[in-house]
Amino acid sequence: MKPLETHLTDQALADPAAVDEMLATQPVGYWSGLVHAAVTRRLRDAMARIDATQPQYWVLNHVNYRPAPPTRQDVVAELTHLADGPQEIPRVVDQLLHRAWLRLDGERLLSLTDEGEAARVRLRDLATALRAEVHEGIGDEEYVATLKVLRRMLANVGADPA
């Protein structure tokens, strides 16, 4: 890569082979996009091998960890922002009800079945193993610093991380 003749933090073209001295000039959107796509693909591929999806894991976790059992509408409202479209979470709830990983009680509240809890634990264990793989060679302090920088960048552009 040709060194820039101007200020060190001038924007350079995205370059996967950029040397360390040039990383400050690299576009964060390029790198964060690559990481997002690669990590998501790796996680979803691993989950597919056990016949599950990342959105199914989100729903199982969400139902499990809420302080009170949610309705279908609660789950859809609270998770749709993570999904690939507005219909994904309603479909996932239907899939999990069909698989008998979720159940609806008489008040239309969702809860995990024993099979659903077993699936949630399998998915958690898989996600934990994949997290260790992704974080290999990265200490907690370095990881926290990275997230703080990304959080600050969101704030700098007026984005709400929620």
Image (cartoon, rainbow, N blue to C red):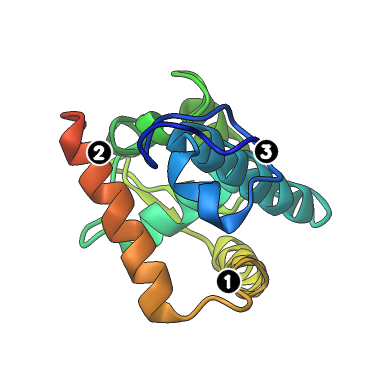
Closer to the camera in the image, 14 or 151: 14
- Give the mark nearer the N terminus: 2 vs 1: 1
Comparing marks 3 and 1, which lies closer to the viewer? 3
Q: Is residue 53 visible?
A: no
At numbered mark 3, what does the secondary structure look like: helix, strand or loop? loop
User: Which of the image's four quarters has the N terminus?
Assistant: top right
Disc 1 packing (10 Å; few <14; some 14–19; many ≥20): few
2 and 3 marks in contact (CB < 8 Å): no
Q: In the rendered view, does 72 fall on the left or right side of 66?
A: right
Residue 154 numbered mark, or none: 2
Q: In the rendered view, does 55 fall on the left or right side of 19?
A: left
Residue at the image point whose x is 58% and y is 54% from the top: 101
At numbered mark 1, what does the secondary structure look like: helix, strand or loop? loop
> Disc 1 marks which residue?
135
The Cα atoms of the two marked residues, 3 and 1, are separated by: 28 Å
The Cα atoms of the two marked residues, 2 and 1, are separated by: 22 Å
- Give the mark nearer the N terminus: 2 vs 3: 3
2 and 1 marks in contact (CB < 8 Å): no
> Disc 3 marks which residue?
1
